[in-house]
């Protein structure tokens, strides 16, 4: 058997003591507040807006 005390700490999947004391869980609003996701959603929204304006005004 492997000794678990010598494993890399980054591979440890157990929650730390500070994570268990947090009272509020992370939900979808936390995910929406991440900058890469908001940039992606803004780009997709902009492309949809441009396509809609092209259909309405130029076709």
Image (cartoon, rainbow, N blue to C red):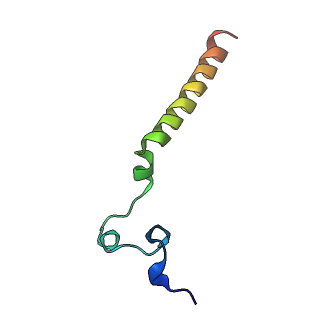
Q: Position of residue 23 (x, y in %)?
A: 30, 68
Residue 4 x, y percent position in the rendering: 49, 83
Q: Residue at x 29, y 72 (%)?
A: 21
- Above or below, 43 against 18 in this view is above
Q: Residue at x 49, y 76 (%)?
A: 7
Q: Judge by depth and name the residue closer to the eye, 56 or 39.
A: 39
Q: Is residue 56 above or below residue 46?
A: above
Q: How many numbered dots are placed on residues in this image? A: 0
Q: Outermost residue toward the right?
A: 59
Q: Quadrant of the N terminus?
A: bottom right
Residue shown at 48% from the left, 35% from the top = 39
Instruction: Give percent across and percent down for residue 37.
Output: 49, 42
- Residue 54, placed above or below residue 35: above
Q: Quadrant of residue 44?
A: top right
Q: Along the horizontal axis of the image, is 43 left or right of 30? A: right
In-image side of 47 versus 39 (left or right): right
- Nearer the observer, 39 or 27: 39
In-front residue for pair 7/46: 7
Q: Position of residue 47 (x, y in %)?
A: 59, 25
Q: Residue most toward the top?
A: 58
The residue most toward the bottom is 1
Could you say which is closer to the camera, residue 24 or residue 4? 4
Q: Is residue 34 above or below residue 59?
A: below
């Amino acid at each position: 058997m492997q000794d678990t005390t010598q494993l890399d700490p980054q591979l440890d999947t157990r929650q730390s003591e500070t994570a268990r004391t947090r009272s509020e869980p992370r939900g979808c609003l936390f995910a929406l507040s991440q900058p890469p996701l908001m940039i992606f959603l803004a780009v997709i929204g902009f492309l949809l807006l441009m396509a809609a304006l092209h259909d309405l005004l130029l076709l």
